[in-house]
Image (cartoon, helix red, strand yellow):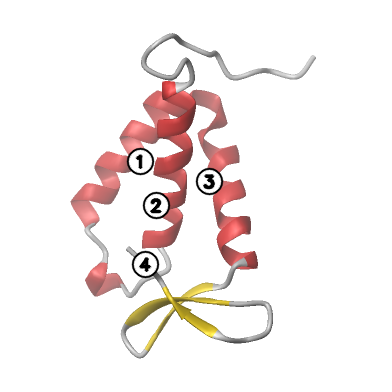
């Protein structure tokens, strides 16, 4: 039987799920910027929050986020965070 993420009440009924996925994407995006731009202690706290909110699914969501960001080619060019479109066009990251 496949394990399912426990849905809780909260604001949306999926608060832990949404927080965990947002943290996974944020961590994977931050891992793509140069080390000197990474907020080290914040990232450690984000990892702890992800473990708390995501439980056994935290690693799965990190893998999913990493794959999505790779497909979308989130990268740093000339000191700017950018996304490369499928046609190769470079689009500044809005953040």
Secondary structure, mark 1, is helix
Compared to 50, does 14 lie above or below? above
Look at discs 2 and 4 and give the one toward the viewer: 4
Q: Is residue 53 left or right of residue 38?
A: right
Tag 2–tag 3 contact (CB < 8 Å): yes
Q: Earlier in the sequence, mark 1 or mark 4?
A: 1
Residue at position x 33%, y 75% from top?
Answer: 34
Real-space Cα distance between discs 2 and 4?
17 Å
Residue at position x 53%, y 13% from top?
Answer: 7
Secondary structure, mark 3, is helix
**Residue at the far right in the pictured view:** 1
Tag 2–tag 1 contact (CB < 8 Å): yes
Real-space Cα distance between discs 3 and 4?
21 Å
Compared to 21, does 92 lie above or below? below
Determine crowd level at label 4: few under 14, some 14-19, many 20+ residues with C-alpha closer than 10 A: few
Q: Which residue is mark 4?
A: 94
Foreground of the two, 67 or 41: 67
Compared to 79, does 4 lie above or below? above
Secondary structure, mark 4, is loop
Q: Which residue is mark 1?
A: 47
Look at discs 1 and 4 and give the one toward the viewer: 4
The numbered disc on residue 27 is 2
Q: Earlier in the sequence, mark 2 or mark 1?
A: 2
Secondary structure, mark 2, is helix
Q: Position of residue 25 (x, y in %)?
A: 46, 50
Q: Earlier in the sequence, mark 1 or mark 3?
A: 1
Real-space Cα distance between discs 1 and 3?
10 Å
């Amino acid at each position: 039987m496949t394990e399912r993420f426990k849905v809780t009440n909260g604001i949306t009924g999926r608060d832990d799920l949404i927080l965990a996925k947002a943290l996974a994407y944020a961590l994977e995006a931050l891992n793509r910027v140069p080390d000197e731009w990474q907020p080290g202690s914040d990232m450690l706290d984000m990892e702890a929050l992800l473990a708390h909110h995501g439980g056994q699914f935290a690693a799965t969501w990190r893998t999913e986020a990493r794959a999505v960001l790779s497909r979308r080619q989130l990268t740093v060019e000339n000191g700017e965070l950018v996304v490369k479109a499928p046609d190769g066009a470079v689009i500044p990251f809005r953040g």
